[in-house]
Image (cartoon, rainbow, N blue to C red):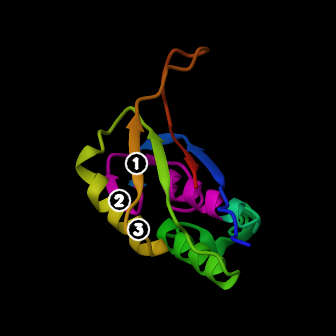
Amino acid sequence: MTALPRIGFGYDVHRLEAGRTLTLGGVVVSRDIGAVAHSDGDVLLHAVCDALLGAAALGDIGMHFPDTDERYRGISSMLLLRHVAALLSDAGYSVGNIDATIILQAPKIKDFVGDMRAAIAAAVDIPWIGYRSRPPRPNASTRSVRGTASPHMR
């Protein structure tokens, strides 16, 4: 019997704040505004990690890398993704595809997409990932947009 593909869904959101670094897909895209987070706040990689862990029924990113553990303060989310890829491999799984969306109004990230794709693909040992970016809709209660999010399905 052929094993069926497993699909996971990940989502992450962080508030943005001036004076921080914004890292997406393992690539620094701004040094003027960035995510408020325990780790480097890379919403794209956090969503990918959650999707991969969920697809393999291996828990979630918070279970493996709790924000109460000082070992993960400021850690590169690329290190977390590589660890997740190793967990999947140890459990007998391989990644077949990644498709992700980043919801972000500014800064524009089109110039970084190639590097983001390459970094993620190398970390999980696949040749290609799908990607798109969308501007967010204003918050109905405040009429403003202040954050970044990344839903992800694997």
Outermost residue, front direction? Answer: 1
Amino acid on which disc 2 is placed: Met
Magenta stretch containing residue 114, yes or no?
no
Q: Residues within 10 Å of mark 3 (few under 14, many from 20)?
A: some
Locate the N terminus by quadrant: bottom right
x, y (%) of residue 50? 65, 58
Question: Residue tagged by mark 2?
Answer: 116
First in residue order: circle 1 vs circle 3: 3
Amino acid on which disc 3 is placed: Ala
x, y (%) of residue 72? 61, 71
Q: CA distance from mark 3 to mark 2?
A: 8 Å
Q: Is residue 63 left or right of residue 138?
A: right
Magenta residues, start to end: 24-52
Q: Residue at x 47, y 28 (%)?
A: 136
Q: CA distance from mark 1 to mark 3?
A: 12 Å
Q: Residue at x 69, y 71 (%)?
A: 2
Q: Which mark is residue 16?
A: none
Question: Residue tagged by mark 1?
Answer: 131
Amino acid on which disc 1 is placed: Tyr
Instruction: Tell me the quarter of the picture where residue 118 sits.
Output: bottom left
x, y (%) of residue 103? 46, 37
Question: Residue tagged by mark 3?
Answer: 121
Asked whether the residues under the numbered discs 2 and 1 touch, taking CB atoms below 8 Å apart as contact, a structural biologist would say yes
Q: Secondary structure at mark 3?
A: helix
